[in-house]
Amino acid sequence: MESHYKRIYTGPSVIADQIAARLKDLDIIPLLKDESESGRLAGFAPQVYGYIQVFVHEDELERSLIVLDEMGDILKEDEK
């Protein structure tokens, strides 16, 4: 099945929520995926707990990347 969504971020839920809020300010509705929670509910131990993936529709990818650029300093701190 072909997906029309692109992942733009994977990391701590606090930052993923900030990205999602800024995207919503631009009328972009992101999809948030918490694989650790999905795995926990299915009975599997998560590889990395608390990490969220943020996806946007491919038609909104370019505008979404502007948000990531604006949050550059926060995202760099997350990488440390």
Image: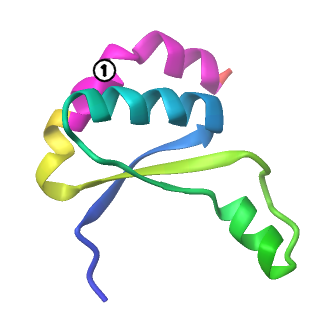
Q: Residues in magenta?
A: 64-79
Where residue 56 sits in the image (x, y, percent)? 29, 52
Identify residue for label 1: 69
The residue type indicated by label 1 comes to: Asp
User: How was this image coloured?
Assistant: rainbow
| Left or right: 46, with 1 as reference point | right
User: In the picture shown, does residue 46 fall above or below 71?
Assistant: below
How packed mark 1 is, by other alpha carbons closer than 10 Å (few <14, some 14-19, many 20 or more), is few
Residue reaching furthest top?
73
Query: Is 73 part of what is drawn in magenta?
Result: yes
x 51%, y 22%: residue: 75
Q: Residue at x 20, y 30 (%)?
A: 26
Q: Which corner quadrant of the image does residue 64 belong to?
A: top left
Q: Which residue is found at the position 40% from the left and 17% from the top? A: 71
Left or right: where does residue 43 sit relative to residue 17? right
- From the image, which quarter does the C terminus lie in? top right
Quadrant into which the N terminus falls? bottom left
Residue 76 among magenta residues: yes
Q: Position of residue 6 (x, y in %)?
A: 31, 57
Picture layout, residue 39 above or below residue 73: below
